[in-house]
Image (spheres, coloured by chain):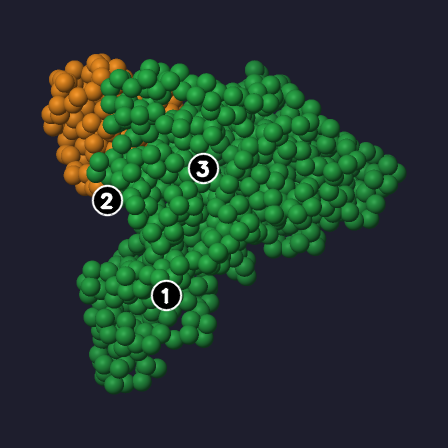
Amino acid sequence: MAKLDINGKTYDVQAEADTPLLWVIREQVGLTGTKYGCGIAQCGACSVHINGEVRRSCSMRLSDVKATDKIITIEGLSANNSHPVQKAWAAVDVPQCGYCQSGQIMAAAALLAKTPNPSDTDIDNAMTNICRCGTYQRIRTAVHMAADSAKRAGAQVAPVAAVKSQVEEI
Amino acid sequence: MTARIFTKTTNLSRRKFIIGSAAAASGGLALGFNLPFGVKPAEAQSIVDGVPELNAWVLIKPDETVVIRIARSEMGQGTLTGLAQLVAEELECDWKNVTTDTITPGVNLARKRAWGEMGTGGSRGIRTSEDYVRRGGATARLMLLQAAADDWKVPVSELTVSSGVISHAGSNRTVSYGKVAAAASKVPAPDPKSIKLKNPKDWKIAGKPLKRLDTEGKLDGSLVYAIDVKVPGMLHAAIKDCPVFGGKLVSFDEAKISRMPGVRRAVRVNESAVAVVADTWWRAKVALDALPIVWDEGPNATRNSAQIAEQLKEGLTATQQVYAFRNEGDALKAINGAAKKVEAVYSTPYLSHSTMEPMNCTVKLSADKAEAWVPTQNAEASLAALSEQSGLPLNKCEVYRHVLGGGFGRRGGNQDYVRQAVNIAKQFPDVPIKLIWSREEDMQHDFYRPISQCRLSAGLDESGKLVGLHVRVSGQSINALVNPSAIPEGYKDERQLQGYTDKPGDAQLGYTVPNLLIEYAMRNTHVPVGPWRGVNTNQNGVYMECFIEEVARAAGADSLEFRRAMMSKHPKHLAVLNAAAEKGNWGKPLPAGVHRGIAQFMGYGSYSAAVAEVSLAKDGKLKVHRLVLALDCGHAVNPDQIAAQVEGSVAYGLTAAMYGECTVDKGRIVESNFHNHPILRLAEMPKVETVIVPSYDFWGGVGEPTICVVSPAVMNAIHAATGKPVRSLPLKNQKLV
């Protein structure tokens, strides 16, 4: 039994200590917005925030995470798609298939939290997640847009813990 | 000779249940039988939550919500939004009230295929259904108007409609669609064929760069992909197929893993695969990795890439089993007698699709019902696979299709992952089984883009004019594996020469050459192949356009002018090439060290051209700065989504050009995951500019056409930079400087 703090809520999970955090989040906790893409920290589809840092959850073990660590998944990034990154993503119509976008959005939100006004080089270095649909050009545009809108609003780009109820497709 | 693996593809077409036919090509029949049409329409979504539909395409609720039904699959290409725009345009509804609903293949069958074909490949989603979906919208509009006219007792000709509000000027009355929809559902429907559709030049909703309708759930993780499905009581399966294609599963030692956490059983899936079923997928995978398995790798276990290359090389000069597809004039004589000759051999590798969402399928089998939750490009093919594999008739089967986490041709006719899931679920009656492939399984058990080589020779006369061209493609055939009935003579496979045809309309060669010989030498291997975004236009575009570049340079001509001189009989090809050249500043000065390349090609009924700007570092590292792509797809339903597809084709095409290859050793694919099979990332993405050149007189595809000009434009720019042609892909294997 381990305790996890995900999106501001405490979960008791039962899984082997070496289970990847990704699969704990998806299968034990039941939050499926965080995706499996490669399992070897290459693609970033599994990106989450841990204490404000973007991490590839497929390559962290359950035992690597403490009960006090604050984990934020895509479901907890904001209420109602209100994070500046999500708004910019909608304005630019970034997603195509959308499968990698949870990870892309988490990576962009972490970048802006540390670098509110990123250069193209900052974006090149931070946005290393794989997208097979090829939405990279729009991701770059949307990151700049999110930075601008956050500046205008004077808002701090920080994740809000708000867990939405998961829709079960049954 | 190598043993061929046994593959089935499934497709439903024209009231026939077809097994063994092609997916993307919707080819011939292997066996057919009638579908059961026993389900009453009333049970098949003609009334939803008490609201009657107007017709198969449109249902309007009292609160003004307009539900537009979508039969084609959405995998990111934007077809869902485009189809809704076309229906809404003719319906004259308010776009902000539009929502969409997807149709299941079981309902489609029960309604005698009221929604037509569901297959979504070959860039056909819009172009082969635009007519009947627009008529669906128009029919609904006429029924709504008639209902209002009946209520007001005025001639319908006196009514007008705008944004879902019907008006009668004479009596100054108005009524909204939501108020009149229930009565309209009882109005006899006019014959759709009698309706005059709008001139696309008058479109107000279609033709506009509207936002996609399916974005919201992709921003907060709430969209449920098939891999995310939760069915009560579900177990999870991880699978391993014999690493060598055509090999067999001999045995596995279930006892060694049966006490591992969460494990239920290890089961044989078919003659070549084993799966472990557990309470979570991760536990199933851990146990599968620990499971002792004995394979019979069979006769293919010694095959490697070098042998396959030799096999293809033989086809370049062979005299037997060669198909002369186009033979106009006497190309060999013209080349032999030419003032100047140019010759080259090109090659392109196997490529994996690597959709971000790996193959997966959830199946629940009961005594009298089979259900599947699937990411599929062809829901009817999934239904057919479910029925055939489960042994239950079609009317006891249903497929719940989910938005795909990428398709690119992988999830069309080849429903291998559905068949596997059914075979596992058969061994767990009444228990839903979710099968997920690991990335390694996905990359090493794909239906790869076919490998090929191409020998080209050309003759120039004294004035530098191309007088003869000989193209010999040698390589693997998709039809030979998945649709052999399309090539009854065994080797005359036109599809492998996609883009070289003389026939207008689909994939026509844009050049007129007085003496032309185009041949195909089919050389198949044990590696399974299938359609991959753009299919054979990719390889054939590289061969033709990079070689034409070589010939133009040998003639001392400008790359653009040399092409133009051969295109006077192909005005649409030429217009697109000119548009790319103009936007791409062809002939204008460039910064030091930056070089341009140009290419044009045709596929999927649309015309494409590209101008690339590249530079090479001293160490040979390639930087692609900018790509301008021009596209004539006839009518442009959503220009912003067309631009998105063009941008995407650049990323997919550049990944192939720079990094893409699946190599063979010991009969299996060597590359296993993104660490040894790199994918283009954001930092390498060039600036993409899309020029849409709509000629408004045909319906062309969008998802695939432009990819075929990406690689040749970049390769020709490298040629410009170094003075040397690049003749083999991927570029990572080439010494460029």
Chain to which mark 3 belongs: B
Considering the numbered disc 3 on the image, is that residue within a helix, a strand or a loop?
helix
Q: Which chain is green?
A: B
Mark sitting on residue A170? 2
Visible residue check, residue B593: no
Disc 3 target residue: B416
Are the residues flagged by discs 2 and 3 in contact, CB closer than 8 Å? Answer: no
**Front residue (pair A149, B228):** B228
Q: Nearer the viewer, mark 2 or mark 3?
A: 3
Chain to which mark 2 belongs: A
Q: Position of residue B302 (x, y in %)?
A: 60, 19
Q: Nearer the viewer, mark 2 or mark 1?
A: 2
Chain to which mark 1 belongs: B
Q: Tell me what hue chain A is rendered in.
A: orange
Quadrant including the N terminus of chain B? top right
> Same subunit under labels 2 and 3?
no
